[in-house]
Image (tube, grey):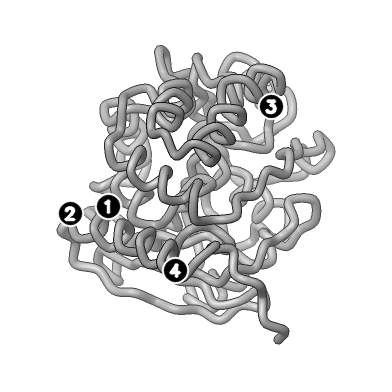
Amino acid sequence: MHQVKSLFKTKEGKNEILRLYDQKLDELNLGFEYIKINTSFGETNIIATGKLSNPPILIFHGSNGCAPIALETYPNLSKNFRVYAIDVLAQPNKSAETRLSMKDDSYGQWVNEIIDSLKIENVIMTGFSFGGLIILKTLEFNESKIKEVYLSAPAYIVNGNPIKALFKIFIPIKRFIKTKKIKYVETFLAELFTDRDEFAIQYLSKVFLNFKMDFTPVPIIDSKKAKSIKTPITIFAATNDILFPGHKMVKRAQKIFPTLKSAILIEDSKHVPNKQQNKLIEEIILENNTLQ
């Protein structure tokens, strides 16, 4: 394998980001284990928690995120599931730094390799934002081992207004990178987060300065591909999401996914739901999958 040029700008920067990763994981106070899986795209780090005998659920964080953030979003899933929180490749976390294309089926192949390696089937998957794209790519590629999926404010179904995103998100990010003034991070996070999140401000300000982010535009799923998916899908869309607007998402999802179980609009939610809204999502997942 040729040496991938690191996406972390400096060794110190990487250490600072991973220190916050470990801090978040400690705060969660979980019994967990790390699982490392070699895939054709590089080593993938997974945090596993919950009884081995429980049904498996894979959880995927959003872009510029990490597995501990996904575990914090749905802290009670491990009561009913064996939870596998995946560190997505090429993100500021503990997995390999191989950047996959959103245009082909690499993500789907990668997730299927993880599932085969874990020797699990009847897998439930849940993911937020970019994690939603990864899940849909998995269903397109090979859905035979997937039982059901839950997508929260998923990428890959609709896109918001790019001009709005430019002014409200990308320009403040660029300003922050130039000036290092934390107010720019707060400005843009206020557009994305329903409630202020101190950890996100800390973590993302380190990520923006120390990590090479991917600003590639997010594609949207082809309706023919969507129509061929057979796995039950539940979508949680946020009414005030500037990246992937909720009303628009529900409309398109109802049109293109024959197996859409439900599309739930979360009122007063921006792109990142708050704790109460995430609890509601978690409760729906748990209710649909109570241990018999």
Query: Where does the N terminus fall, quadrant-wise?
Result: bottom right
- Give the Cα separation between the discs numbered 1 and 3: 37 Å
Residue 4 at x, y = what percent?
66, 75
Is residue 55 among what the camera can see? no
Closer mark to the observer between disc 1 and disc 3: 3
Check disc 3 and report the residue beneath it. Answer: 159
Amino acid type indicated by mark 4: Lys
Amino acid type indicated by mark 3: Asn
Check disc 2 and report the residue beneath it. Answer: 27
Secondary structure of the residue carrying numbered label 3: loop
In the image: residue 141, left or right of residue 10 = right
Check disc 1 and report the residue beneath it. Answer: 291
The residue that appears at 50% across and 46% down in the rendered structure is 208
Check disc 4 and report the residue beneath it. Answer: 94
The residue that appears at 40% across and 59% down in the rendered structure is 85
- CB within 8 Å, label 4 to label 1: no
Height in image: 52 above or below 165?
A: below
Height in image: 61 above or below 55?
A: above
- Give the Cα separation between the discs numbered 4 and 2: 18 Å
Amino acid type indicated by mark 2: Glu
- Give the Cα separation between the discs numbered 3 and 2: 34 Å
Q: Residue furthest front?
A: 179
Amino acid type indicated by mark 1: Leu
The residue that appears at 49% across and 49% down in the rendered structure is 209
- CB within 8 Å, label 1 to label 2: no
Label whose residue precedes the other's in the sequence (1 or 2): 2
